[in-house]
Image (cartoon, rainbow, N blue to C red):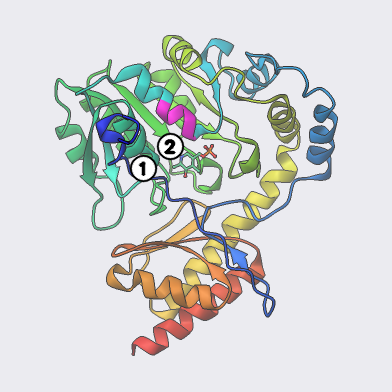
Amino acid sequence: MPAPRLRADIASLPAYKAGQRPAERTDIVTYKISSNENPYPPLPRVKAAIADAASSIHRYPDPFNRRLVSALARKFDVSEDRIALGTGSVSLVGQVIMSAASAGDQVIYAWRSFESYPIWTQMAGAVSVKVPLLPDERHDLDAMAAAVNERTRVIFICSPNNPTGQAVTAAELDAFLERVPSDLVVVLDEAYAEFIGDEDIHDGVSVATRHDNVVVLRTFSKAYGLAGLRVGFAIAHPDVAEALRKTALPFGVSSIAEEAALVSLEAEDELFERVHALVNERRRVAGALQEQGWELHPSYANFVWMRLGDRATDFAAACEEQGITVRAFPGEGVRVTVAETEANDRFLEVAHAFRMALR
Ligand SMILES: *Cc1c(COP(=O)(O)O)cnc(C)c1O
């Protein structure tokens, strides 16, 4: 019997490679530092809100998640019609592409960057235009602007960039936006914005309110520690936000996710202390790696990137052996999430031993 007939290009769709889980070990505590998750468990009041919300899950959630939309509008001082929620900002990446690009259109993004971009682009039947990062891991915004043509429908700027950690500055972003058509959708994917810890970097929300074509994507998954609940949001021109609502999975953001997000916004002071601690840990880890002799470029996210080339796979295997699961990009590098101090320390020991063995 022939296999059921699917779209011909589905077979070539790259599968999303989630960060691996550590193998079961009884000899040591293992750490999964491969998915840029927040190492801190939910705050007690977030857990309580989740438990409370559970008593109403026989009902669909509010399809418009009005309470969360309104809380976000207040927080960012924008009108509610500029906010669209999604089941993680990963979903919003797809919704933006579906809203702006059709078959044969082009989507520009830096490479290497977030691996959802090629997947969603291909799912929309559009064509990826990957612009290589600069040698210092930053976006080559000149080349990206030069790549724009009449088929271009969306440009993604991932800042801080996953997996390299570099960020685009406000001045670079302004210059870039001057160069590209003012009706071309430019997505600023700021999944790690809260980890920047530096004044010099863009504030995407103010950019989006000054430029109608800019869409900012944020998420509760990383800094707010709600990765398992799937809730992210976009701030965009009202017409774009409306398109994002139309292309969303109906009732996608659950009442549980909405309540947890609302309480997390209220608990921001406490959550951002954790973020601050992680930023300090990132500085410590990056500094220690440099002292060990590794060459690193700055990271503004909750991970560090080591461009190891052919050694990436071996390095990841060495980490795995010590119960540390990192994310390897074979032939390119490894991305290592900054986590609890014990995990970071163990990782640094492995990196040190690996370095010594290279001598
Ligand atoms: C983690 C991440 C996201 C969002 O993840 P969600 O859990 O779907 O909100 C978006 N963009 C980048 C670059 C990321 O790394």
Q: Classify mark 1: residues with Cα within 10 Å, few (<14), some (14-19) or many (20+).
A: many
Query: How far from the left and from the top, in percent, is residue 274?
Result: 68, 51
In the rendered structure, find residue 65 and report the number of the disc placed on it.
none
Most foreground residue, 263 or 255: 255
Q: Secondary structure at mark 2?
A: loop
Residue 261, quarter of picture:
top right
Q: Amino acid at mark 1?
A: Val
Left or right relative to 149: residue 1: right
Q: Which residue is mark 2?
A: 202
Query: How far from the left and from the top, in percent, is residue 195?
Result: 54, 48
Residue displayed at 47% across by 37% down? 190
Any atom of ligand 1 within 8 Å of the CB at mark 1? no
User: Relative to residue 166, is residue 335 depicted above or below?
Assistant: below
Was residue 30 drawn as part of the magenta stretch in this picture? no
* Callouts 2 and 1 close, C-beta under 8 Å: yes
Q: Amino acid at mark 2?
A: His
Residue stretch in magenta: 90-94
Query: Which quadrant does the C terminus fall into?
Result: bottom left
Query: How far from the left and from the top, in percent, is residue 273?
Result: 69, 49
Marks 2 and 1 sit apart, C-alpha to C-alpha, by: 7 Å
Left or right relative to 71: residue 187: left
Q: Classify mark 2: residues with Cα within 10 Å, few (<14), some (14-19) or many (20+).
A: many
Residue displayed at 49% across by 51% down? 301
